[in-house]
Amino acid sequence: MIVKDAKKTFAIETSNILFVEKYKEEINNKILIKDRIYEIMYKSKKPNFVVITKNNKAIVVEKIIGIFDGKFVPKEFPNIKGFVKNIFSFPVPVLDLQNIKNEFVESKTKPKILLIDDSVTTRKIVSKLLEKYNFEVTTAKDGVDGIEKFKNEKFDLVICDVEMPNLGGFETAKRIKNQYNVPIILFSTISKENIQKAINIADTFISKDEPPTVLVNTIRKLLGESYE
């Protein structure tokens, strides 16, 4: 079977394939298919299909070109057992599924998000939601704590409550924006007259009453294509 992503074309021996499925979301480099968890050993940046192998590993690719006969030429390289010559003008590398290591995964860095909210419940619920969508989340209990977190870590985006003790969300957002210039979402249930103020200070405002997908999609939009 010849598969492809944006940068690579390679082959998987059909004798080593159990089945092929449409891609589903994974958590911590693992994917659940048919009530079983498989470790991902390769992942394209544009995942569309999952090839499950006989050693119970998942190969996630963008395209499946097809199944072709060809002449196999053994040649050992890291994660490669040889090359196959068939309809292509170039030899196609064949994955060594017995010895493949998960560093072959075409991974991307998880976006680091700072969540600032004085509510323990909100911090737990939102953190769990974002981690499900492959974001790395650090929490802070108020604005002072949030600004302190920036002294030791870099963040790609900040989600900040408005009404908090010690230092409110508006002032927290102003200070973070001036010092670190990262995208900020003010996330609260403030009155209508304060919504425009929130938008003027931060990049956007989202009500806590909105569906969770609104928050996730807004984060993706603010972070841009590099994290799609």
Image: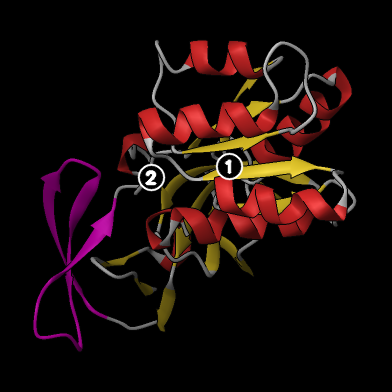
Q: Reading the chain from its start, which is encountered first: label 2 or label 1?
A: 2
Question: How has the structure been colored for display?
Answer: secondary structure
Q: Quadrant of residue 94?
A: bottom left
- Per the model, the C-alpha gap separating discs 2 and 1 is 10 Å
Secondary structure found at label 1: loop
Q: Residue at x 85, y 44 (%)?
A: 190
Task: Look at mark 2 in the image and give the residue it sits on.
Answer: 108
Residue stretch in magenta: 70-95
Q: Residue at x 74, y 25 (%)?
A: 117
In the displayed structure, does residue 104 sit left or right of residue 175? left
Q: Residue at x 58, y 26 (%)?
A: 172
Task: Look at mark 1 in the image and give the residue it sits on.
Answer: 134
Name which residue type carries label 2: Lys
| Location of residue 77 with respect to 63 vertically, above or below | above
Query: Per the image, is 2 magenta?
Result: no
Percent coordinates x, y for residue 167 in the rendering: 67, 17
Percent coordinates x, y for residue 218 in the rendering: 62, 58
**Viewer-closest of 109 and 216:** 216
Name which residue type carries label 1: Asn
Secondary structure found at label 2: loop
Query: Per the image, is 87 magenta?
Result: yes
**Viewer-closest of 174 and 91:** 174
The residue carrying pointer 2 sits among few (fewer than 14), some (14 to 19) or many (20 or more) residues within 10 Å by Cα, namely few
**Viewer-closest of 13 and 192:** 192
Q: Quadrant of the N terminus?
A: bottom left
The residue carrying pointer 1 sits among few (fewer than 14), some (14 to 19) or many (20 or more) residues within 10 Å by Cα, namely some
